[in-house]
Amino acid sequence: MKLLLSQRNQLFDTILGHGYPSEDFDFVKLPVQGALHDENSQIIYLPNSEYYFQIGRGDVSRGFIEYSPGESQLIASRKFAGWNDLYNSFTCWLMFLKRELEESDLWGGISTVFNKLGLQPILIDTHFSSDEFIRLEKYMNELQIAVKTLQLNQDQQTNIILRLEESLNRAKSERRIDWASHFIGGMMSLFITLSVTPNVQSKFWSLVKAIFSGILLTSNI
């Protein structure tokens, strides 16, 4: 579907209004097979080209849009009726895009933590033995004491210590690999929620390396 210049400019202004740099997007005209005087329009997010908003012609009275990311799926599509309907969908797409760009990759983050520390998890899919749980309890207490030496405000410190206590209780019933994933992923998620600085996060994981090596982690070095 061919857009008016004024409509293209309105989309451009909307991108800027949502706080995006203009150079992160490109407007592409796509030829339509068998239609010499028509074209599909596609707006591409250049830093990650799998994200786009495409406008095409559907039936006589409606156009057709396809975009990624969608509200609850990677690619979504629907028909639209008129410019206002199209424009509302475009503003929603910009919000969906912002959500995905601001989301932290917790799974990738776990790997990043291990790689930075030169560690890997002990991949034994069993429950902690009684002796191991006693050691884990001792190490968790040491970690809680060490957390109090980090540059955290009172709310951050309290919530981190509570999360460590919850993690220890989970170790009574969870298998080792599941517990390690929940512990690391949970702490990373909590750091984001509490706005813990990257420097303090790095110091925390260094404490984990020093305290937990042997029961939870093994060195790659």
Image: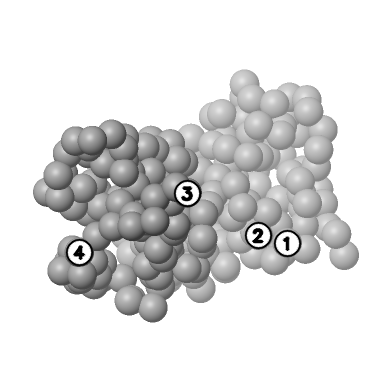
The kind of residue on which mark 3 rests is Gln
Q: From the viewer's side, name the closer residue of 182 and 21.
A: 21
Q: Earlier in the sequence, mark 3 or mark 4?
A: 4
What label does residue 33 carry, if any?
Answer: 3
For marks 1 and 2, give the CA distance: 5 Å
Q: Residue furthest right?
A: 221
Q: In the rendered image, which residue does mark 4 sit on?
A: 4
Where does residue 163 sit, x and y in percent of width and height?
A: 46, 42
Asked if disc 1 and disc 2 are in contact, CB closer than 8 Å, the reply is: yes
Q: Is residue 191 visible?
A: no
Q: In the rendered image, which residue does mark 1 sit on?
A: 115
Q: In the rendered image, which residue does mark 2 sit on?
A: 112
For marks 3 and 2, give the CA distance: 46 Å
Of circles 4 and 2, the one toward us is 4
Q: Earlier in the sequence, mark 4 or mark 2?
A: 4
| 27 horizontally vs 185: left or right | left
The kind of residue on which mark 1 rests is Asn
Question: Within 10 Å of the Cα at label 3, are there few (<14), some (14-19), or many (20+) other Cα atoms?
Answer: few
Residue at (22% x, 54% y) in the render:
91
Q: Earlier in the sequence, mark 3 or mark 1?
A: 3
What label does residue 204 carry, if any?
Answer: none
Residue at (23% x, 66% y) in the render:
8
Q: From the viewer's side, name the closer residue of 12 and 144.
A: 12
Q: From the viewer's side, name the closer residue of 214 and 114.
A: 114
Where does residue 218 sit, x and y in percent of width and height?
A: 82, 51
The kind of residue on which mark 2 rests is Thr
Q: From the viewer's side, name the closer residue of 2 and 138.
A: 2
